[in-house]
Image (cartoon, helix red, strand yellow):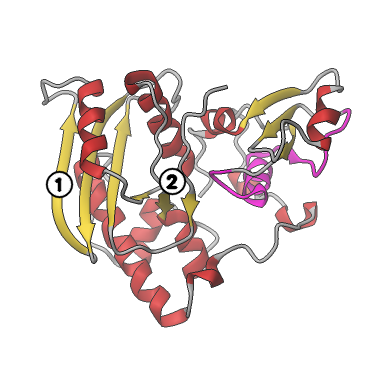
Amino acid sequence: MNERFTGKNLLELPQDFSVVQIETTDLNPTRDQIIEIAANKYRKNKFKKAFEWDSEEDKNDLRDALSQLKSFIGKDTIVINCTAFFRPFMGNAFVNNLGEPFSNDIVDIQRLFRKIENQKSAKLSQMINFYNLSTSHNLKAAEDIKSVEEIYLNLQTNFKERFKSVNELQPKSSKFTSQDIAGDSTKNDKNNIFYDKRVSATGKLNAYTRREVGQMINDIGGHFQMNPGKTTDYFIVGKLKGNTSHKLEKAEKLPNVKIIHEDDFLDMVAGYEWA
């Protein structure tokens, strides 16, 4: 399949970046539309210029808005809130309207918040309260972007106080067991397609680490498996060193396994608030 998002999900804190916030008609990125876009460009942590688009107020359609956004952000690293929401919506929108994937690297404040502040939950409203911000979470792109910016700048400040290098934020090891990712039953979602399903994965995942994907599946109420087997329902495939892998070859021989690309997986969890 054609990839819809080729940028990396970085655990870094650049001072030159663009912040992007979107609002959509609903939570299915293959069916629903982006209706608001707000973007602010920063250099050395200082605001430089802004871009806004509202489908109800602007004469330009989404295709024109995305073309303008592409020119506005250039090759910047993009600061966002929630990879599982932003990546599939923006990736699908770029492919469907511009005929190309969204290729900028991203920095997700939720991932940074967990790492830097050592918090298990990172919903936008909780991060706003954590930093005692006066900004809002009103589901309006032009307003919520202010919260994303303030949270990111606070993360930069606290990072400098507690860490010597961004290397300390990187996963220590790719190895983990099922016991390391025990699900949180309070986050179960019986309406999610992965609830009570058994899921495994192979290859290098671009949006999240395999451990994060496993945690998400178990939090939903599914069962992440270290290896595919007869009970496996879904098998997620990331980037492979060759055209296949031992796990993929095994999964292809199993009769009831649905093999999906990482981008398809993100489409399927876009509506799940796992933070």
Nearer the observer: mark 2 or 1; the answer is 1
- Distance from the alpha carbon under mark 2 to that under mark 1: 21 Å
Asked whether, in this view, residue 8 is left or right of residue 24, the answer is right
Residue 85 is situated, as x and y percent measured from the top left of the image, at: 44, 37
Asked whether, in this view, residue 86 is left or right of residue 84, the answer is left
Please tell me which residue is depicted at 19% across the width and 24% down the height of the picture. 55
Residue 104 is situated, as x and y percent measured from the top left of the image, at: 38, 43
Please tell me which residue is depicted at 46% across the width and 35% down the height of the picture. 5
Q: Which mark is residue 82?
A: 2
Secondary structure under the numbered disc 1 in the rendered image: strand
Residue 14 is situated, as x and y percent measured from the top left of the image, at: 35, 62
In the image, residue 129 sits, relative to residue 195, either above or below, namely: below
Please tell me which residue is depicted at 41% across the width and 53% down the height of the picture. 107
Q: Mark 1 = which residue? A: 50
Q: In the rendered structure, does residue 64 fall within the stretch colored magenta?
A: no
Amino acid type of the residue tagged 2 in the rendering = Cys
Of callouts 2 and 1, the N-terminal one: 1
Please tell me which residue is depicted at 59% across the width and 31% down the height of the picture. 265
Q: Which segment is the magenta one?
A: 206-230
Residue 274 is situated, as x and y percent measured from the top left of the image, at: 53, 45
Of all residues, the one furthest to the front in this rendering is: 242
Amino acid type of the residue tagged 1 in the rendering = Ala
> Pointer 2: residues within 10 angstroms few (<14), some, or many (20+)?
many
In the image, residue 104 sits, relative to residue 111, either above or below, namely: above
Q: Quadrant of residue 261?
A: top right
Q: Which mark is residue 158?
A: none
Query: Residue 185 versus residue 172: which sits nearer the camera?
Result: 172
Query: Residue 24 versus residue 157: which sits nearer the camera?
Result: 157
Q: Quadrant of residue 217?
A: top right
